[in-house]
Amino acid sequence: MNWTRPFQRILITTVIVALALSALSLLYYRYVHFPWTRDAQVRANVVGIAPRVSGPIIHVPLTDNQILSKGDLLFEIDPSTYQASLLKAQALAEQTQADLVRAKQQLDRDTVLYAKRVIDLRELQNAQDEYASAEATFHAAQATLQSARLDLGFTRVVSPIDGYLTNFDTSPGTYVTAGQRLLALVDSNSFWVAAYFTETQLAHIQIGDSVQIKLISHPGTTFYGKVESVGWGIHRTDGAAINLLPQVQQTIEWVRLPQRFPVRIKFDPHPTLPLRIGETASVSIIRRVH
């Protein structure tokens, strides 16, 4: 009886099983100690632009989705009212300056007369009080003048950052109110990745870990970054009150899915390719900080 062939089959099967178990062990080790996720998105800081003065818009040199540099004009508000306020503040400042000079001259004269015993102390004190009052009024007028200059300058709204204009639908004639957000800019220097890892993986993620980033929008390019922070909580609907009673979702007792927490990834270096908020990404830890 030939035992060679069955023995070979058993050996081959054993080797295949051992290789499969080794591969599974290696994959599990990498999954646990070098976590990865396909649940990630590109994010960026969005700067809301609101005018600091109110009035109708007279000039808009923009188009939607335009690339902007810091200092570029976004829109201009009718400056007529603020120009008039500036002229009035200038006139008031000049008047209070003249009053201050006059009060100083009177104080100087009364100081000399008091030294010669021509006037009494009360008259000198009255002159001192008049001068102090004129000085305070002058400083208040200077502040009003500075405020009027600022308001006039605020009629020209410029970009505070390098970025991209998005979802823009404003035209000349629109009346804007101070402090009311009118448009949004995506900060082109603030792109980062929000990667969602399961709670079982968080113990193996530390701030400073090096990561590899793949974007669906740029399939041939590999990006790199570092773990910047790990989220401390997520919103849970269970227990939210509806009609003063807690809402609790039904669960299957034998299936307990781990929660996912956001991990903030900073690009390192920052990509030169254009990025967009919401792009799908996959993130894997490639080197851990010890």
Image: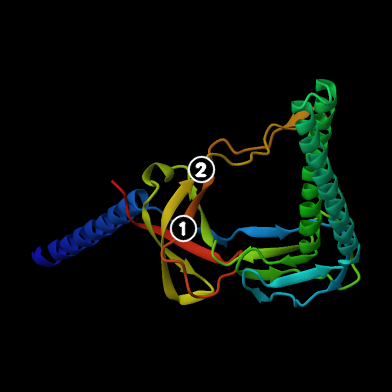
Decide if residue 23 is on the left or right side of residue 257: left
- Report the front residue among 157 and 65: 157
Residue at image position (41%, 66%) is 269
Q: Which comes sooner in the sequence, label 1 or label 2?
A: 2
In the picture, residue 42 is in which quadrant?
A: bottom right
Name the element at disc 2. Answer: loop
The image's colour scheme reads: rainbow
Q: Is residue 57 above or below residue 141?
A: below
Q: How many numbered badges does the structure rendering display?
A: 2
Q: Is residue 176 visible?
A: no
Circle 2 is placed at which residue position?
Answer: 258
Please state the horizontal and vertical placement of residue 24, each as a whole percent of the image.
Answer: 31, 55
Q: Quadrant of residue 200?
A: top left
From this viewpoint, is residue 167 visible? yes
Relative image position of residue 25 (x, y in whole percent): 29, 52
Q: Residue at x 51, y 59 (%)?
A: 193
Quarter the N terminus occupies: bottom left
Residue at which label 1 appears: 266
Residue 183 or 139: which is nearer the viewer? 139
Q: How far across and down, in percent of the image, does residue 278 sit?
A: 61, 64
Q: Is residue 49 left or right of residue 42?
A: right
Mark 1 neighbour density, 10 Å: few (under 14) some (14–19) many (20 or more): many
Residue 237 image point, x, y percent: 68, 39
Say what amino acid the circle numbered 2 marks: Pro
Q: Give the spatial CA distance, label 1 vs label 2.
A: 25 Å
Position of 96 relative to 91 (above/below):
above
Pointer 1 and pointer 2: residues touching (CB < 8 Å)?
no
